[in-house]
Image (spheres, rainbow, N blue to C red):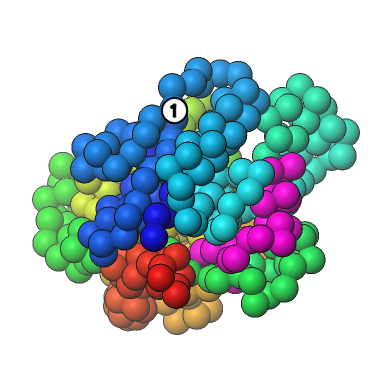
Amino acid sequence: MKIALISQSFEENKGGAEKFSSELAKYLIKKGLNIKLFARKIEVSDLKPFGVEIKIPKKPPFFRILILAYTGLYLAKKWKADRIFAMMPLPEGDFYWLAGGVYSNWLKIKYPNVMERVIACLFKPHNLLNLYFQKRCITSSTLKKVITNSDLEKNIAIKTFNISPEKIVVIPNGVNLTCFNLSVKKDRDIMRKKLGFNKSDKIIMFAGNNFKRKGLETVIKALARLKNISKLYLLVAGKDKTDYFIKLSQRLGVSEKIKFLGYVKEIEKIYGMADLFVFPSQYDSFASVVLEAMACGLSVITTKTNGASMVINHGEEGFILKRWDDDRLLAEYIVKTLENSEEMGFKAYQKALNYSAENCFEKYYQVLAADL
């Protein structure tokens, strides 16, 4: 049985979909499946022998997506694949990976105004192409399963595409427990000293590469509400433009309480020195940083619009905000969490043990290899 995986790229040094798809592909190969990868870019040495790079320009996005989709499908069929796993919006596939979210829902969040959405689709036609491909693939009568990573995304898909709940499999993201675990705390004091913090300081951590969508503004506003707490600080990890957020922190009088770290290669060490992880995302199918933080013994405050909130019991391993921009309630939850950070953090660690990357990949294997 031959299984083709078609994706934009397979890359280890990127976050999100690229890294996950790479790790999943390696696991499926290790399990003995006959796998072939089709993508614009394959930058994982272990995967190159199993992949075909489709050489197309990166821009414009419309033609990149169009050519990649149809070329990938053509090559997969030429290879005589028995099953096609669409890991990007494609016009067809036996399995569809709904990890990046329902595209129409994301556009509504990104462009709340109807006219803004119309203009975005007219001037950025790849939006229309993604909408079309996603709907066509998910509503196809030949599609076996939609695989998504959260109950949040499952419910949105059912409402958007009017498909049967039985056709959707929810497999929450997993976390690498070898890398993310309680041992990261051993360098806690060393890391704090290195970054200019004391043992007694209370450190809130935020991580993400899209500061606006991930809710950094809300975190800064919440910190401003707590600026009378003298030893409370915020660490921001991730690669994004900082000008707006620096100016905001200056205007609110908390600029000296925030340190922007940029991209952090060994982010587990930052988890290890923090007391709390805050992630009020405007929208995420399932933000993996939530499980990473929990596995490192940090309680988490996130939003109901982050699919990863499904692994948190409100008031136990952390707190869940109903609105991503509620900085008043976020400030309240930060205080409550810091008062019980050790107990809540250990509960978070225990919960994360149920979501190992190995268990996650094994569930994908069971779905993709069913009846082989």
In the rendering, at what x and y percent does residue 125 appear?
73, 27
For the point 49% across and 56% down, the residue is 83
Q: Residue at x 53, y 50 (%)?
A: 86
Left or right relative to 122: residue 40:
left
Residue at 79% x, 43% y: name it: 112
Q: Quadrant of residue 145?
A: bottom right
Relative to 312, does residue 244 appear above or below in the rendering? above
How packed mark 1 is, by other alpha carbons closer than 10 Å (few <14, some 14-19, many 20 or more), is some
Write down the region rendered in magenta: 131-152
Q: Is residue 280 visible?
A: no
Q: Residue 123's x, y, as percent?
A: 76, 22
Q: Quadrant of the N terminus?
A: bottom left
In the displayed structure image, the side of residue 333 where residue 139 appears, left or right: right
Picture coordinates of residue 158 (x, y %)? 73, 67
Q: Quadrant of the C terminus?
A: bottom left
Q: Residue at x 23, y 59 (%)?
A: 30
The answer to whether any part of residue 314 appears in the image is: yes
Q: What kind of residue is marked 1? A: Ile
Labels in figure, total: 1
- Please check the rendered image and state whether residue 62 is part of the magenta-colored stretch, yes or no: no
Q: Secondary structure at mark 1?
A: loop
Could you say which is closer to the camera, residue 37 or residue 24?
37
Establish if 224 lies above or below 68: below
- Disc 1 marks which residue? 54
